[in-house]
Image (tube, rainbow, N blue to C red):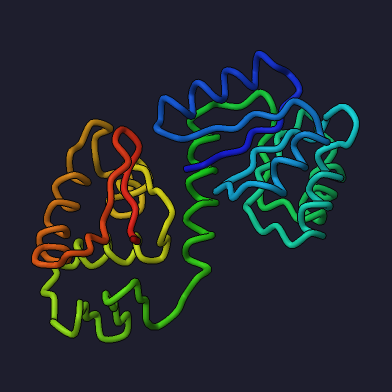
Amino acid sequence: MYVLVVEDERRLAQLIRRVLEEEGHTVDLAYDGEEGLAMGMESSHDVIVLDILLPGINGIEVCQALRKNRVDTPILLLTALDDVQDRVRGLDAGADDYLGKPFAFQELLARMRALSRRRVQAREPDRLQSADLVLDLNRRRAERAGRLIELSPKEFALLEFLMRNEGRVITRTQILDHLWGYDHTPDSNLVDVYVSYLRRKVDKGHADKLIGTIRGVGYFLGR
């Protein structure tokens, strides 16, 4: 996941980045509202973690500005405020969720995964296509260059997940969580095994290889 963290408490911001990077995510940091707004406008993040109490432009104003400029990246607000009205203001400004300080990092990670899944699930076409690879979601059929590809249910689900995020690097953690939920161990090699299965079925015999790897990060689909 590509995450933007906007937090003026530098020690907390650095700690969040370390935790997220240990989970395999890529993290940008901003320490005030102006910087966070600029980075949120310029980059295609998967999730924005945004503190409300920021110097200069506060988090609610940043959220409003991003939504006004049609940035639809999921936003998770961090707040030390207990007032329900402040949380309501944040959600009304376009935030997708909020998390009160102090928080457990496992909850932060879980909420980020939920926002990422929600964004992916919002895209619901009946047919996905990348180059000559076609996935028919209604008939549960995959074809490449007109040739039928026999896929197991898990292989189909993995290919669908990659195709819905064409061109985007998907981490092993995201794939594990999306396909297997919590029924896996952190060091599981399930993802590598199933990507290997897919490569043999999708790319073997084709000059253009569609399934790519970013070493140490994850996988992507696209040329």
Q: Nearer the viewer, residue 190 or 182?
A: 190
Q: Position of residue 3 (x, y in %)?
A: 56, 39
Residue at x 23% of width, y 67% of height = 156
Q: Quadrant of residue 151?
A: bottom left
Q: Which quadrant holds the C terminus? A: bottom left
Left or right relative to 130: residue 87: right
- Residue at 24% x, 40% y is 184
**Can you name the residue that lies furthest to the right here?**
56
Is 35 displayed left or right of 123 in the figure? right
Which of these two is toward me, 198 or 100?
198
Query: Which residue: 35% across, 53% down?
Result: 178
Residue depicted at 48% across the width and 23% down the height:
19
Q: Is residue 204 above or below residue 178?
A: below
Where is residue 132 shown, x and y percent of the image? 27, 77
Q: Is residue 51 above or below residue 125?
A: above
Give the number of callouts.
Answer: 0
- x and y percentages locating residue 40 in the rendered image: 70, 45
Q: Is residue 168 left or right of residue 74?
A: left
Relative to 207, residue 100 above or below: above
Foreground of the two, 187 or 203: 203
Which quadrant would residue 152 be assigned to in this image?
bottom left
Q: On the image, which quarter does residue 51 sit in?
A: top right
Q: Position of residue 129 (x, y in %)?
A: 35, 76
In the image, taking residue 77 as reference, residue 147 lies left or right, namely left
Q: Residue furthest front?
A: 207
